[in-house]
Image (cartoon, rainbow, N blue to C red):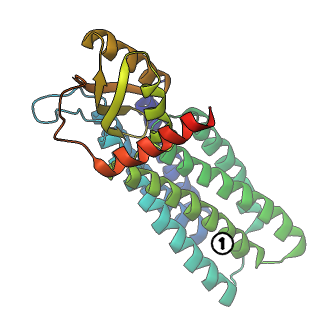
Amino acid sequence: MKSDKKILIAFILNLLFSVFEFFGGAFTGSVAILSDAVHDMGDALSICVSYLLEKKSKKDADLKYTYGYTRYSLLGCTLTSVILLIGSVIVVVNAIEKFINPEPINYNGMIIFAIIGVIVNFVAVFFTRGGDSLNQKAVNLHMLEDVLGWVLVLIGAVVMRFTDFVYLDPIMSICLAVFIIINALKNLIEVADVFLEKAPKEIDIRELCSSLCELDGIIDVHHIHVRSFDGQINSASMHIVTDIDAHIAKEKVRSLLKERGIEHATIETETVDEECHDRNCILEFEVEQHHHNHNHKH
């Protein structure tokens, strides 16, 4: 199933459950359930925006966006992660208040709603699992947050029903919030790396250059740039010095790049006696040093 459809399913489930919580909170008179309904409604709205952005990211390149719309997906990831961070901070603040002023809790009501909450949100996690896009991963984390939250509520409600230890509720809330904050920050760091055009972490530039230089007919590689469009699709541009047919040389380079997870490549060929005016001297020095050390070992 496509990532945008998975996000749509997560949105529908989250929206329906938040409406269910509003009715449940009004019926039981539980302020805690009503507060969570507001939280889930906010989740549903952020997921809705993520869905629209994921859908837009699938559009092909045009005259306005010559690289395509793929990075709209990253905007969805950013929005969802920021909302997770804000929501987690609010949870921590409320938990601290509960420590200071503990309130009576309807344990039976908590147990019933927790069971329903675990089931509904587990279904949402199931549908959003295994996503490749950072946006879908953020939405999946959103759903996982809700599942873990309701599991903790269920366990806590059962324990508190028999022990009446009301402080367990805020303790669990803080633990969950810290878990979500750590993972949401990881998502934001990944998005920042893509926007700053940092080389993908799974690609070793020095090793890549050495491997390219070991190809028959490839004498030198320089002015190399590797980046990711959206955390999934990698691209590269480079100059290669070759003494064989340019078309054959390019095919060899493209084949090796695909093995390294680089689908899109812009390659400029140069002859041995041709001077390049665009050399990146620092990177060239690092690559040459690595290549020299690599050959010395052999």
Give coordinates of residue 270: x percent, y percent: 22, 24
Q: Is residue 184 visible?
A: yes
| Side of 1 relative to 178 (left or right) | left
Give coordinates of residue 8: x percent, y percent: 43, 35
Residue in the foreground of this view, choosing between 208 and 272: 272
| Identity of the residue furthest to the right in this view | 162
- Residue 273 figure quarter: top left
| Side of 40 relative to 192 (left or right) | right
The residue sitting at 63% across, 62% down in the picture is 179
The residue sitting at 83% across, 62% down in the picture is 158
Q: Is residue 215 above or below residue 198?
A: above
- Image quadrant for the C terminus? top right
Q: Identify which amino acid the numbered label 1 is placed on.
A: Ile
The residue sitting at 56% across, 49% down in the picture is 141
Residue in the foreground of this view, choosing between 40 and 58: 58
Residue in the foreground of this view, choosing between 93 and 222: 222
Give coordinates of residue 110: x percent, y percent: 71, 61
- Residue 135 figure quarter: top left
| Identity of the residue furthest to the bottom in this view | 100
Q: Is residue 203 visible?
A: no
| Side of 277 relative to 109 (left or right) | left
Give coordinates of residue 107: x percent, y percent: 76, 66
Give the labeled residue for mark 1: 174
Residue in the foreground of this view, choosing between 290 and 174: 290
Q: Is residue 117 above or below residue 6?
A: below
Q: Helix, strand, or loop for circle 1?
A: helix
| Identity of the residue furthest to the left in this view | 63
The residue sitting at 35% across, 30% down in the picture is 220
Total tally of numbered discs in the picture:
1
Q: Is residue 146 above or below residue 99?
A: above
Classed neighbour count for the residue bearing mark 1: other residues with Cα under 10 Å, few (<14), some (14–19), many (≥20)? some
